[in-house]
Structure formats: C-alpha cells, structure tokens
Amino acid sequence: MATLIVTDEIIIHAPLSKVWDVLIKSKYIREWDDLPDDFPEEVLDVGSEIIWDFPDGSFSKNTVVKAEEGKEMQIALYVSNWEVTPKLGEIIYSFEILMHGDGTRLRLRHGDFSLLSNGEDYQEASAKFSAIAKRKIKQLAENR
C-alpha cells in the first residue's frame, strides 16, 4: 500500500527560538490552527493533549509525542470513529525547524494516512492545512 504523507516547507526570516515559540505556545497556535475554546493558555510539551468533542459523541485527540526544543515537535492524531486504532505516533503532524542561513527552515510532515479507508481525504485536507499554516507561522515568527 502506498503511503499518504504530506510534506511541505518554508523559509522563515526569524531565529529558531521565535519559530519554536510560535509552534508551542497556545496563544500563537490559535493564530495558525484551531484549538478548542476551553483550551488553556499554555506551552505544549510531551504529553500535552488537545481534545475536541463532537456533537455525535465522537472525539478527536492530538497528543504531543515529541517536543525537542528548537528542533522538532510531533503531534499524534487520533479520531474515535476511525475504523482503525493507530498506534500512538503512527499518524502524526510533524514540525521540524532547521537553521537556514540567518533564518529558519520549517519542514512539515503529516501522515501516514494510508491506514485509513478515507486516507486520501485526510491527505488532501492536511495539504490544504499545511499550505495555510506554514504562511501564518512564518508571518507570526517574523513579526513578533
């Protein structure tokens, strides 16, 4: 079975530390991704969970499984009504930051959605998310 992974990247004209802050502080995350209304103002770290409850009783849970300061954050995805239960970290959103001259290269990797029967839909939605989020992360890091 082919993998269904989204990869993307962007150059950000800001130091690693500013990009990292935009990735881990909920006050910035709210600017480039959705968070539940009741999610506290905090700094994401390994074990942090973001949970959305849906009207039909299902839920979505994102769990930070890796937070290597100034390097990489990985968030495991899980939706309760998926037909499979992936192992923690099998389906992730990964944000890796690297030095790039006097700025930063942000690499995004989302997937592998091939475990899901509708994985192509998740891959397409993640590609759209990535295209918007990377530009907003860049804007926030460069202008704060």
Image (tube, grey):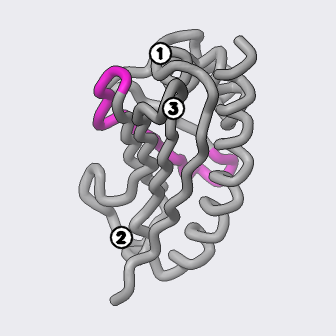
Tags 1 and 2 in contact by the CB under 8 Å rule?
no
Which residue appears farthest toward the left when viewing the image?
87
Three-letter residue code for mark 1: Ser
Q: Is residue 86 above or below residue 18?
A: below
Secondary structure state at the residue bearing disc 3: strand
Asked if residue 98 lies left or right of residue 55, the reply is left
Instruction: Identify the residue under disc 2.
Output: 84
Asked if residue 115 lies left or right of residue 141, the reply is left
Count neighbours of disc 2 (C-alpha within 10 A) and say few if under 14, some if 14 to 19, many if 20 or more. few
In the foreground, 55 or 135 = 135
Expressed as whole percent of the image width and height from the top left, the position of residue 143 reads: 74, 17
Three-letter residue code for mark 3: Thr
Expressed as whole percent of the image width and height from the top left, the position of residue 28 reads: 65, 20
Report the magenta residues as a range. Answer: 54-70
Instruction: Identify the residue under disc 3.
Output: 104
Q: Nearer the viewer, mark 3 or mark 1?
A: 3
Secondary structure state at the residue bearing disc 1: helix
Q: CA distance from mark 2 to mark 3?
A: 37 Å
Three-letter residue code for mark 2: Val
* Quadrant of res 1: bottom left
Secondary structure state at the residue bearing disc 2: loop
Tags 2 and 3 in contact by the CB under 8 Å rule?
no
In the foreground, 144 or 49 = 144
In the foreground, 109 or 92 = 109
Expressed as whole percent of the image width and height from the top left, the position of residue 137 reads: 66, 32
Looking at the figure, which quarter contains the C terminus? top right
